[in-house]
Image: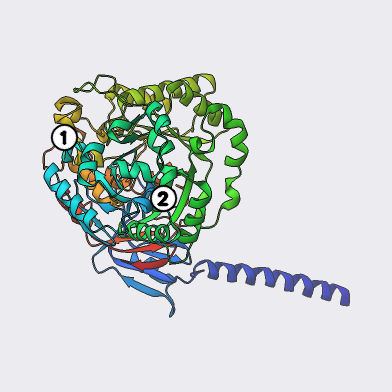
Amino acid sequence: MKLKVKQFLTWNSLFLFVVLSIFQFSCNESEPKEIAEFIYHNGSIITMSGKSPEYVEAVATIGKEIVALGKFDEVKKLESDSTVLVDLNGTTLLPGFIDSHLHPMLATILIQTNIIAFNDWKLPHGFFKGVRDGDSYLKKLRSAVANHKPKDEPFISWGYHHLFHGEVDKDILDKLFPDVPVIIWQYSFHEVRMNSAAIELLDIDYKAAMLHHQVDMMRGRFYETGMAEMVAPKLLPYILSPKGAAEGMILTAKAIQNGGVTTVGDMAMPLIDFDLELRLLKGILDNETIPFRTYLIPNARLFANSSEKLQAAFSIIDSLDVYNSEKVQFVKQVKLLADGAFYAQLMQMKEPYLDGHEGEWLTEPEELEKYADFFWKRDYRIHVHANGDKGVEKTLETLEKLQRDNPKEDHRFTFHHLGYTDKDQVQRMATLGAHASIQPYYVYALSSKYSETGLGKERAQNISPVGYLIDNDIVTCFHSDFFMAPADPLTLMWVAVNRKSIDGKTFGRELRVSPWEALKAVTINGAFHLNQEHHIGSIEIGKKADFVILDKDPLKVDAEDIGDIKVLKTVYEGRAFPQ
């Protein structure tokens, strides 16, 4: 009898325990599980998570992640005495901007030079007013060279463009500066022009230069592979000295932060020298004071300068993630190059240039196909620099062959720049499942000049045809390719929405896109192009707490005013960084 009583008590106690546990669990479910560190409210909060604009009243973060969003009263339930309520005071909060094609090393180099360009540049170390005629350019150049010290080191200026500044070659530079080594870097970064003193200082191999197909030695002009192979390595001691390189990278980081960017895709690493660049990127950007992360996409040609060497180089490329840190990471993607620079009118065009000159190949089409096939078979995401419609055509033919021989659904093969392409090519891209990372700034910088020289009025209307891409439902992002455009996504948005040139003319009115599509191109679509859409690019629970705070809502201001919106602050992984 006693045993039965004990058994009754035991089972009764167990039953009571289970009931109480369920009751306690239910009570806990109705209470906040977490305490927010920050709650942002009282502003326009655009999530970028849907097919159309979605606003919420508040968003809460803990540590590096977003933990809640929605109505303020609901999100406020996560508040405690330690929670910081951030009153946006009517400003706008968005996911942090993403520039998926930006070259920190290119910017580090050029930001150290004397900037004399056709457009205005507002940079962390000053404002550089553009000049748009030959006399003004040479006047600025003479003044800058006169103040250059020491005289036995090269004077380097970036921003020259012959359509704005007239022809400046070795003979002109020799007459103006017979004793000072002078190098003018064409706006595209793909070309330099030098005087005799600079050629002598860099000890350029005269005979080899005369034989190189992308060197005009008589004019002191080195372009595309001629510049990369014969000039860039000789310039390294001057453009990437330890002190200058560090200062240049710090200025570059500030410029990226000022644009509201919280994620960067370095779309060709290395540019010149792997070891030097990796040390600099890790030394400066892998730092708690830097409010953005950087994904590094290997530059295939710098690891293997011919397709025959790819197999040997691949063991290195495929193991680059050993260098990864939280902020600086190599990813399983690769950069390839088709035709020449758009800024230098060296892109390959189907129809001839009006003045009879020809474009250039950075990689011959047959060789490009071999590179692409190699990485396709190894499941690497492939990014191809393709500027002119002939460059795009050869890249399309490569993708068509890849899909025919080894079809894939979610391959994310991406065309970059797309300075000039037509409707039919864009439709083929869509059919093949390709994506696009386009440079809208070409419209602003070059439409007017290219309508007069090189392309003509009809083709100039279709420069950077963002509208075609959106109409064909191609996932499209914008990039700065900094210094090819400012590291300022709002500027890129303004150009795509308005399609105004530097002289105020409208080109390709029908190719304008809505502010919403433009905003997607610098947020969630940018994340998609880096294969990071599950972590960044929109305001959703579980994603990184990366935000940009603007003084106005780009979806509500007049389209003409988007470029005037100010970045007030960025938030990187939950930590605020005021401008």
Circle 1 crowding by C-alpha within 10 Å: few under 14, some 14–19, many from 20: some
Picture coordinates of residue 177, whole percent (x, y): 23, 47
Q: Which kind of residue does numbered mark 1 sit on?
A: Lys
Numbered mark located on residue 449 in the image: 1
Residue 446 visible in image: yes
**Structure colour scheme:** rainbow
Position of 246 relative to 560 (above/below) = below
Quickly name the residue at label 2: 105
Q: Residue at x 43, y 28 (%)?
A: 363
Given residues 240 and 373, the one toward you in this image is 240
Position of 87 relative to 336 (above/below) = below
Q: Residue furthest front?
A: 179
Q: Secondary structure at mark 1?
A: helix
- Where, by quadrant of the figure, is residue 58 drawn? bottom left
Residue 169 visible in image: no
From the image, which quarter does the C terminus lie in?
bottom left
Numbered mark located on residue 524 in the image: none
Position of 411 relative to 83 (above/below) = above
Q: Which kind of residue does numbered mark 2 sit on?
A: Met
- Where, by quadrant of the figure, is residue 217 drawn? top left
